Amino acid sequence: MPELLGVTSLVFGFLVVLVLAFRYWAIREVLVCAFLARAALACVHYWLFPLPYGVHDAAVFERIAWKWGQEGFWHAFTQFNPAASFVYSWLASLLYALTGRSALMLQGINVLGGTLIVFHSYLIAKELWGERRAKVTAWFVAVFPFLVQVAAVTHREVVIVYFLTLGVLFLVRWGHDSTLRHLVLAFGFLLASTILHGGMISVVLGAGLFVFWSTFGLSLKRFLVGRIRIPAFVTVLLMLTIAAGSGIVIGETLRLSTVGDLTSIDVEVFTRMVQDRARGEAAYLENVYPTSFFDIAWQAPLRIIYFLISPFPWHISSVSHAVAMSDVALHLVVFLGLWRSRHLILNDRGALAVVAVLIVAIGAFAVVTSNFGTAMRHRAKFLPIFAALWAVPVFRIRFVLLRNKFSETSTQSE
């Protein structure tokens, strides 16, 4: 029965992907390949040997889901707690209560979700840069190793990123057309991601800051600076105060599972979190802890660098660490593409909305992370969005220069 449920979920997912492939013919190969790669790894994990990211948190999520689900639907339903880290297990337990236990079924659902993330990244990039660049983005996300692996196991990351990318898609559309419906959908999906991971409230805050600034901030700045002659920094301070107040209200409502509620955040909370996570062979900045808000501020850029591109060569002490360097190399390719796309990004309101989300979210996750294994998992949440911002080919400039040089050489030889 578990195998039948699992195979059924995979078949159903493949049918959904085929429908999308026929509807979006330009990326039919991308969608099919993305699904098959994830489905193949799901089968490997279930029948042959466990994948690295399927033996710790993923196994715990599935085990708790069965613990709740085997007691019946009502018992499973009453286990909901948005302040805990097991909302994914709660959702899975509701399904288990109806169908029985099948880890492969949950894997099949994640396989479909992972493929839809590829689809969302394609739609975001298409909205920003057009069909051609969107297809490149889709291929990159489809074959990115970590995203393929995490979609093949029973991990909550897929559901989090599913809602994140969907919310960002509508945020970009709002940035282009200022439609209220798109804005409501954007915040609705982004808030859904916070229920699965409290730290995603940073995404909502980043989006809120951009919406406030682009809607009211520019007019307020012109009014205050141009007419009343109040210094610009006072305007910025006012906007930050309003944004912080909004964040406190949201945080108090949702009760963040990562750092508690925003009204009680202090330096000791950050210090304790950083120390707890700076453990094992993958730890970094082990002796760099914040003891004041000033420390948090000056350490933030350093921690963001480590968060985005660690492990560094001096961290390598095993084969698994060396393999992690491939993840860093792929991220560096993306960042190089973003740097070369900066002029296009800065002139597109939808792209700037994504940048605002990424800056706040990356900063929030980086300041409390001290382990490059954890950093790899968290930064992968944002990889589909980073890739969607990639507006120009990374190696286009060099190729053009080489082509021009070749043309000049040919002309001289004639």
Image: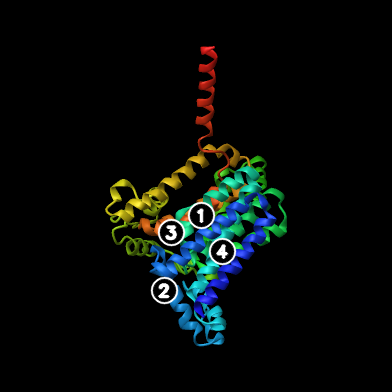
- Mark 3 or mark 4, which has the lower sequence index? 4
**Which tag is nearer the camera, tag 1 or tag 2?**
2
- The crowd level at tag 3 (other Cα within 10 Å; few <14, some 14-19, many 20+) is some
- Kindly report the distance in space between the C-alpha atoms of the residues bearing marks 1 and 3: 10 Å
Q: Quadrant of the C terminus?
A: top right
Q: Secondary structure at mark 4?
A: helix
Disc 1 + disc 2, Cβ < 8 Å? no
Q: Secondary structure at mark 3?
A: helix
- Kindly report the distance in space between the C-alpha atoms of the residues bearing marks 4 and 2: 20 Å
> Which label is found at residue 113?
4
Disc 4 + disc 2, Cβ < 8 Å? no
Amino acid at pointer 1: Phe
Determine which residue is flagged by label 3: 377
Q: Secondary structure at mark 2?
A: helix
Residue at image location 33% in from the left, 58% down from the top: 291
**Which tag is nearer the camera, tag 1 or tag 4?**
4
- The crowd level at tag 4 (other Cα within 10 Å; few <14, some 14-19, many 20+) is many
**Which tag is nearer the camera, tag 4 or tag 2?**
4
Amino acid at pointer 3: Arg
Amino acid at pointer 2: Val
Q: Secondary structure at mark 1?
A: helix
Determine which residue is flagged by label 1: 382
- Kindly report the distance in space between the C-alpha atoms of the residues bearing marks 2 and 3: 16 Å
Determine which residue is flagged by label 2: 60
**Which tag is nearer the camera, tag 3 or tag 4?**
4
Q: Is residue 134 visible?
A: yes
Q: Is residue 221 visible?
A: no
